[in-house]
Amino acid sequence: MNKPRLAWAITGSGHYIEECLNFLLTLDAVDLYLSQAAEEVIKMYGFNLTEIREKMPVYRDKAASSPPVGLFYTGYYHTFVMAPATSNTVAKCVLGIADSLVTNLYSQAGKCRVPSIVYPCDIAPEMETTAPKGKRVMVYPRQIDLEGTEKLGMFEYTSIVKSVDELIASVTARLAVVANEGATE
């Protein structure tokens, strides 16, 4: 078997999506998973899916059974990242609903004890976020959305990050752990 890879999923949130994608595109050995809404949002923020495909495999939410989730059972992935993640996706994950490619990936990662790093779009009662064309706007997440983020952070094998800097640090640290594990085998 080849060395395990990183699985990264994007949902329909534009919350610092440019920064998330720019970091993602610097990584090696990563597969990208997109929700249907993510495909739309990526285009709205000026990214070209064809160019992303030149850098890494891209899987889209097109099959009812989400076939790629089986890769977690073979040790193909060492880490699952969901960044950015919508409040809808977070809520489904909290309730154990795995009815889409991304929620199924999160569910199966947890069942296989594969660590997940999640960057939710709703992380504080007042926060700045990005709109298309780089505009910064203020948003005020609902209490239920903030509670979803908090609950998801209590799940086994799940780490919540609250900024792009934390995301980068957490993914980088995880990759260092994986590289160290590979060096000692």
Image (spheres, grey):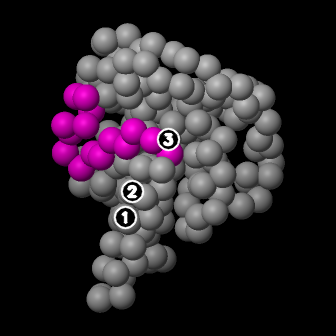
Against 103, residue 117 (above or below) is below
Q: Is residue 52 visible?
A: yes
Against 14, residue 26 (above or below) is below
The answer to which quarter of the image holds residue 24 is bottom right
Q: Which residue is mark 3?
A: 83
Nearest to the observer: residue 112 or residue 7: 7
Dot 1 amino acid type: Arg
Q: Which residues are magenta?
A: 150-164
Q: Are marks 1 and 3 in contact (CB under 8 Å)?
A: no
Closer to the chain start, of discs 1 and 3, is 3
Question: In percent of the image, x 55 and y 61: which residue is there?
Answer: 30
Label ID, residue 170? 2
**Within the magenta stretch, is there residue 64?**
no
Q: Are marks 1 and 2 in contact (CB under 8 Å)?
A: yes
Label ID, residue 18? none
Dot 3 amino acid type: Ala
In whole angstroms, how far apart are the C-alphas of marks 1 and 2?
6 Å
In whole angstroms, how far apart are the C-alphas of marks 2 and 3?
12 Å
The answer to which quarter of the image holds residue 103 is top left
Q: Which residue is mark 1?
A: 174
Closer to the chain start, of discs 2 and 3, is 3
Question: In percent of the image, x 33 and y 72: which residue is there?
Answer: 177
The percent position of residue 183, horizontal first and vertical second, equals 36, 88
The percent position of residue 88, horizontal first and vertical second, equals 43, 20
